[in-house]
Image: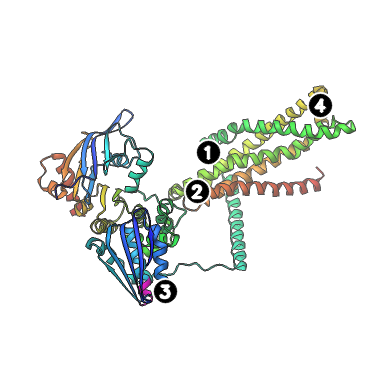
Amino acid sequence: MGQSVNSKSVSMTMIPAGDRSLTIRLIGRLDAFSTGSIWREAVDGVKARGWEDVVVEADGLDYIDGTGIGLLVQLRTIQTERGNRIDIKGLRPEFKRLLDMFDPSFFTNIPPENTEKKRFLEKIGYASAELFSDMKSLVSFVGEIFSALSFALKKPSQVRWKDVYLVSEKAGIDALPIIILIGFLMGLIMSFQSALTLERFGAELFVANLLGLSMFRELGPLMTSILFASRSGSAFAAEIGTMKVNDELKAISTMGINPVSFLAVPRVIAALSMTPLLTLFFIFSSLIGGAVVMLSMGYPLTAYISRVFSSLNISDFLGGMLKAVIFSIFVAGIACHRGLMTGTGASAVGESTTSAVVSGIILIAVVDGVFAVIYYCLGI
Amino acid sequence: MKEKEPIISVRNLTCAYGENVIVDDITFDVMPGEIFVIMGGSGCGKSTVLNHMIGLDIPGSGEILIDGLNIVSAQGETRLKILSKIGVMYQMGALFGSMTLLENVRLPMEEFTDLPLEAMDFIAGMKLALVGLRSYSGLMPSEISGGMKKRAAIARAMALDPGILFLDEPSAGLDPVTTAEIDEVIKGLSEDLGVTFVIVSHELSSIFNIADRVIMLDKRLKKIVAEGDPRELREHSDDPIVREFLQRKAWNKESI
C-alpha cells in the first residue's frame, strides 16, 4: 500500500508500481491553503527515485487553483529534466489549459541569479572603496556648503530666511525643554556624585569649580551638540530624504535651484545660531542642578556662585562657544548630506536618518579631540 | 447562464467623508468571471467606491456583499475570510521597496500558507511569468519601469489565487503599448483563471478593449448614470453625459 497524506481539504496517496512507476492520486481541493501540506511529500516522493513513469490521477480534484497547478508544474519539471515521463490524467479542461501555459522549458531557461558570494578580502576592498567615496563626497559637500554660506554672506537676500526662522523654531526653541531637563539632571548628578567623593577630603565646595569648568569648556557644547544631532539632525535627514524619495529634489534641480543652498544652507544657519544659545541654556540649567546639591549640603548660594566663576576665565567661555558653533555646522551639514544622499524606497530614509545621527556623533567626538589638541597647544 | 449569483453585490451604498457626500445611494452587482469597470471623470468617486469595496473605508450607509459576506460589518475571522478572496493592485503598485519582485509576490504566501520556501519561490516565479516578468524576479521595484511595477503588483495581488482582483487605474500614466500589455494580462487572467476583475479606470481605449460591463459615475449627480456593455453604451446611450464622456474621448482617442 502506498504512502498517504491527508490535510484540511486535500488528500494524496502515492502508490508505487514496481521500481519504475508511481501513481499519485489526488482528491479534494488543491488550493493556496491546502497545497502546502502535501507539497514536500509529493516533490520528495517523485524525486526519491528516478521513476520512469509518474501518473497523477487528478479526476478526484474538485478544485485546483494557481498554487495547485504550481505543484503539478513542479512535478512535471522534475520528470522532464530527468528525461522521464509524467502523465496527468483526468484534469478538467479549464485546469488543463492553465497547466499547459507553463511549458517546462520555460522554467529551465531562467537566467541564473547572481548569487556568487564575495570573498572576505573582496568585501574589505568594497567596504574601503565605499568608505573612501563616502569621505570624498563628504569633503566635496563641506566645500559646497562653505561656498554656499559665503555666497549667502555676500548676498543675504538670497537666503530663504523664512525657512531659517522655521527651522530655528523647530530645532531651537522646541528643543529647549529637553535641553534644560538633561542639563539640570546632568548638573545634579555630576555634583552629587563628585560631592560624595570630595566630602571625604572636606573639599565639597570644589564641586562648583569642577562643574563650572567642565560644563563651560567641555560638556556643555558636547552634550548639546549630541542632543541636537539626535533630535534635529535626524529630522533634517528624514525630511530631505523623503523629499529625495518623492522626486522633489529632482524638481528643485530642474528648476535650476541648487539643493544645497535651498535646503542645507537655511538649516545650517539655523543650527549655527541656535546651538550656542542651546549650549548656554544647557550650561546654566546644569549649574542650577549643581546649586540644588550644594544648597542641600548647607553651602550658601553666593559661595557656590563665586566658586563657579572664580575658576573660569573668558577664554573658557569663548572656547566652549566656538566648539558649539563648529559642532553645529558639522552636525547640520552631515545631516543634510545624508538626506541628499538617500537612495530609493522607504528603508533608505531610515538608513540615512540613522547614518546622520551616527556620523554626527562620531564627527563631534573627532572634532572635539582636535579642539583638545589645539587648545592645549595654544595654552587655553 | 443567467442563473448565476453575483459574486459582489453593492446595495444602496452611500460614500461620504464627513458632510461631503461622494456617491449617493448606488446599487450594482458584479458577476463571477466578468471584467467589470467603474468609470467616470476625475473626482467622480471611482476610487472611493473601490476603497469601500475592499473594506478600507466605512460607508455612510449601505452594504457590500463579497461572495455573500458583508465586508462593511465583518470583523475578525469573517473579515480575513473575505480578504482572502480578494487581491488589490493600488494605483502606484505599492510594492515594498526593500524587497525584490519575487519576495514581494512571496510575502502573502509566507504569511498565510504553510508552503515550503522552495515551493513559494516556484509559485511566485509562476505568478511573475503570468504577467511576463519571470526574468526580472531578482530586481528591486526601483529598478523597473512604471508598467512593470503595475504588472508585478498584479502578480502580488494574485499570490494567493483570489477569485476577485481589484485594480485601481491599471493603465494610468502608461504609454499605449504598455497599457495594451496590461490589458492583455488582465484578459489572459480572466480567460485562463476565471478571475473576476473590478477595475477603476477612465482610459476609454482600455475600457472598450477589456470590459464586459461598466458602470459610469457622475460627479454632479453622485449616482450611476449608465450601466452595461461599454460598446453598446457608446453607440446607443441616450444620456448626454454618457455620450459626451464616451464619444468625445473616443473621438480624442482616434485623433491621436
For the residues labelled 2 and 4, say whether their Cβ atoms are less than 8 Å apart.
no
Could you tell me which chain the residue with mark 4 belongs to? A
| Image marks 4 and 1: residues in contact by CB distance under 8 Å | no
Residue A262 visible somewhere in the drawing: no
| Residue A380 pos. (x, y %) | 80, 42
Question: What is the distance, in whole Å, between disc 1 and disc 2 at their CAs?
Answer: 16 Å
For disc 3, the marked residue is: A49
Q: Indicate which disc, 2 or 4, sits on the residue closer to the N terminus.
A: 2
Point out residue A183 in the picture as x, y percentages from the top left corner: 69, 33
Dividing the image into 4 quarters, which one contains the N terminus of chain A?
bottom left
- In percent of width and height, residue B138 lies at 43, 62
Most foreground residue, A238 or A322 = A238
Dominant secondary structure, magenta: helix
* Magenta-span inclusion, residue B47: no
Q: Is residue B42 above or below residue A196?
A: below
Secondary structure beneath dot 1 equals: helix
